[in-house]
Amino acid sequence: MAELRFIDDFPVKGVRFIDISPKLADKNDFAKIIDEMSAKVPENADYIIAPESRGYIFGTAIANKLNIGFVPIRKPRKTSR
């Protein structure tokens, strides 16, 4: 089983980034994650809607598994400098 990686102070000081790449790279872990998330989707769902970045990764896989549509959504701007 792959382990998550934690990176302190990334992308800015005080933030702890969780790297999910090891879970995505492990076919068994990724399949288990998709199975568990798919089990929570109501049977009458027509679409999976997910926010960008990680949501696209999981949302498309869940939609594919359930043979339903996928709708990507954008997050509002996270930074305004």
Image (cartoon, grey):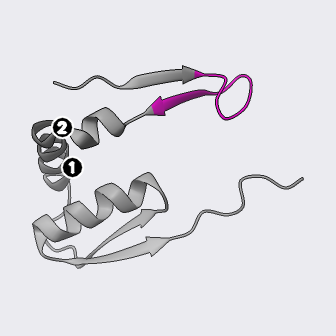
Q: Which mark is residue 26?
A: 2
Q: Which of the 4 quarters of the picture holds residue 20?
A: top left
Residue 9: image x %, image y %? 67, 23
Q: Nearer the viewer, residue 79 or 49?
A: 79
Q: Residues within 10 Å of mark 2 (few under 14, many from 20)?
A: few
Q: Nearer the viewer, residue 49 or 4?
A: 4
User: Mark 2 falls on what kind of element?
Assistant: loop
**In the image, is residue 51 above or below residue 47?**
above
> In the visual, does 45 lie left or right of 16?
left
Residue bearing mark 1: 37
> In the visual, does 4 lie left or right of 14?
left
Q: Is residue 5 magenta?
A: no
Q: Residue at x 56, y 69 (%)?
A: 74
Sequence order check, earlier mark of 2 and 1: 2
**In the image, is residue 20 above or below residue 81?**
above
Residue 69: image x %, image y %? 25, 79
Q: Residue at x 38, y 76 (%)?
A: 71
Q: Which of the 4 quarters of the picture holds residue 32?
A: top left
Number of numbered discs present?
A: 2
**In the image, is residue 26 above or below residue 43?**
above
Amino acid type, callout 2: Asp
Q: Please report the bounds of the magenta region as a residue range.
A: 8-18
User: Mark 1 falls on what kind of element?
Assistant: helix
> In the visual, does 9 lie left or right of 39?
right
Amino acid type, callout 1: Met
Q: Nearer the viewer, residue 47 or 74?
A: 74
Q: Quadrant of the N terminus?
A: top left
